[in-house]
Amino acid sequence: MKIRRFFDKRTWPLWVSFWLPLLIMTGYFIYRHMAPFGSSSLLTVDLGQQYVDLFAYFRHTLLHDPSAFFYSFSKTIGGEMVGVWAYYLMSPFNLIYLFFPGQSITTGIFLVTVLKYGCAGLSFAWLLTKTHTQKGWLVPTFSTAYAMMGWMIANQLNMIWLDTTAILPLVILGLERLFKTGKVRYFAGWLAVMLIDNYYMGYMVILFSCLYWLYGATKYWQNFKTFCVHVLKFAWGGLLAVALSAWILLPTLWALMQSKAKYNVTKVHWKFEYAPWKMLAKFVTGTFNFDQMPSGQPNFYVAWLAIFAFILFFCRRKFHWTVKVSTLLVTAVLILSFCYEPLDLLWHADQFPVWYPYRFSFVFCFWIVWIGAQALTDRLTVKWWQGTIMLLLTAGIFGTVYLNIKHVTYVTQANLLITIALAAVTLIFLLVPKPRIQLYQIIALLIVAVDMSINAVASLNNLSYVSQDEFGNYTKVLDQTVNQIKASNSGFYRIGKTFTRTKDDPMQAAYNGADHFSSTFESIIPNFFGSIGQPDGDGVVAYTNGTLISDSLLDMQYFMDKNVPTSQKSNADYRSYIPVTSTKPDLQNYQKSSTLSNTKISTYKNPYALGLGFGASDNITKLKVSKTTGDPIARQELIYQTLANRSTSGLITAENFDQVIFQNVKRVTTLTGSVVNKQNLAKTGSIYFKFTPPTNDSYYITLGSNLTTSNASYYINGKELKQYPTYRHTIAVNVATNSKGKTVTFGIQMKKTSLWLQNFTLYKLNNAQFKQSAKVLQQEPWHLTHHSSRQLRGTINIKKAHQVLMTTIPYSRGWHATVDGKAVTTNKVINTFVAVPLSQGKHTVTLTYRPPMLLTGSLISGVAAIGTVAWFTLKRRRD
């Protein structure tokens, strides 16, 4: 009886709406051999370079380290995590990853992806059913058009956003109930869920809710008094939703003020971003590919049945003219937002998206399908005059696209013909008489399913994916090596490496590293990393150019280095899944550990690492380090010697090359800052810089941001320089160590007709002086007796006056210090790190991280929740 009730005549359309898109996408993924059904995976672009590592971090946090919800030292050298959770990890679907450890997480991603397709269809079907908009087979017809919309296909790899498609229909259902019954709780509740799940998409849902309210106000108009009541209840519902989610929104707001909000657009251009007619090309199936990711038009393809139904809305007399006008107004605002810069910026919270433009196009897809679902009756009837209007509009769309097909390269003639055929079949189907209604409803569902499946296949076939072996083998080796290090040392330390799959490797393998990539990344870390010669960008750092100084300062106690394979076959296999991103001769100065190494990776221990904290001269509190003065090597010297209270010159010296050989390049007398030009433009231009070190000291060459791999290739003694490919500031490259009396040749092969030798300088580090400074700084270590992700406690013996506890913990208002049980104020030194002032003698120092505004947000949410419960309890008793 229970099973029959579960699948009765009222619920079966919901289950069809859930299973149909889920099975269609599952079938396609099996066809593409996605794990666990083959050798490929769903990992591509950000899903493969960022999200998968964060999902692994999510799993580690819930199962092993709950305190990492607030702060993590796997986020570069340390960073707040509430903002990361709010943007990336609050989806309840992520709980599925708890059952998929290590390399099997790709199977979890497969499962979560198809479930999100299914839940989008189920949610839209619930909206259709509860509002009595559709019934029977037309419920899954429209829900499939929604669940498999072009936005969903194009952003499948951005799976952190996909929950929105399941929550949006429930928010709209809440608005419908607000208008019909005056009840606010459904709207406020689901909007709060949306904001907690993903505040970024929730912001877009709020904007769309405001537009939808204008439509609803005309749809349910009674009188001015009722209108005012609806205004107040809508505002109250929105405020209540924000209050209920304040516990995560306020700490996230603070995090954004330290990161993404610093990059807001300050000047708005009141212009169209492209010719608006180009949007018409997105009505053609399969118009999504890699080129459309960084910049392109909005992805809003939906089934032609839904498009024709939307047109039908304006041709039906059952809808009042005021409702049609408001519908047209909302549609116009959405369309204008796709091409008019001020509106585009508004939808994206005053920031142009970095890749994936027009992220709000899901609301347009919803709007088209939802309005169409209200217009098309269960008999699927369309009059000939209505069909004529549809035909003329469709012909105008296809004609415009065809005449301008050279200007929309993502449209192929084959896909255009397929779309014309789909539209023609759909329009003919709507016009023909239908004696057996149920049969024709099933046919309508098949037409939509085929339509949306063709778009999914045609679009996703344009993308390539990371193979399961490439991801799985790398993850296995990384986990194995990190676990060996952890088993040998339970203290606090950071680990560096000379290879990289992604910048979030530390989160994938749950270790303290120095790389990171996320949208909520505090700006002080990229700024600091860029100033000391590391590749950095907005939201990304890669610690691939560490010197002896920076390795020591940042407590890189261990380094993982690839082993060079012996056979050619193993070498090819090895290079395929362990990408080397750093040439580091300095590893010869560290101690190779046979017990911590394996067949793929060698592990080195750094004897000069200073620990997370150490006693240092308080002169560091007065030091001002600017990115505009000096170069990365000089900055490292200045910081390190100031900490050790030693002379700030002599540790590093600029050196001259012994010989410079120009091949097919016009000779210049001054190297640094010169622009060199080819002589014969048809031939390769090369420059070879030679020097013979008189000592075994470390040598570095600085390369300006112009000297990237896009402009030239670089070689050390004939071997390619392994280097992270992109950087926006000058970097420092380790070219020699322990090379006394050996000639070192640094070669540059030009890829263009000219090359700017920006900040191109050779430096020598006096290793003996460096070791003396390191020894001074190691005399007063902060001995940690307890360490977790958000609390560190240890003892330190300050032997001299005018000292501070210097840490390499990124400064944040969330860090609170106590010295011998008494609260003290922390200092922000070199605009980056936490330092604690200390008097001479032995001290116990504790640092605790409390997310700023978390308590305030929690109080607001608590009061809102208690107040809401109390209100409904009193109301129920009164009733």
Image (cartoon, rainbow, N blue to C red):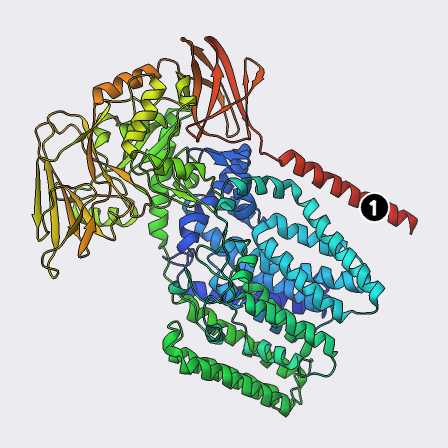
347 is higher (above) or lower (below) than 769: below
Q: Is residue 810 left or right of residue 818?
A: left
- Residue drawn where x is 22% and y is 50% of the image: 572
Residue 613: which quarter of the image? Answer: top left
Give the answer, above or below, for where 603 lies relative to 297. Answer: above
Residue sitting at x 47%, y 44% = 54
Is residue 140 visible from the viewing direction of this image?
A: no
Please give left or right for residue 244 compared with residue 772 in the image.
right
Give percent across and percent down for residue 401.
44, 79
Q: Residue at x 62, y 77 (%)?
A: 310
Q: Who is closer to the viewer here, 269 or 743? A: 269
**Camera-nearest residue between 278 and 433:** 278
- Given the image, on which type of amino acid does mark 1 rest? Trp
- Callout 1 environment at 10 Å: few (<14), some (14 to 19), or many (20+)? few
Task: Give the image location of residue 599, x and y in percent.
Answer: 26, 37
Which residue is denoted by mark 1 in the rendering?
871
Q: Is residue 802 above or below residue 476?
A: above
Q: Secondary structure at mark 1?
A: helix
Q: Quadrant of residue 251?
A: top right
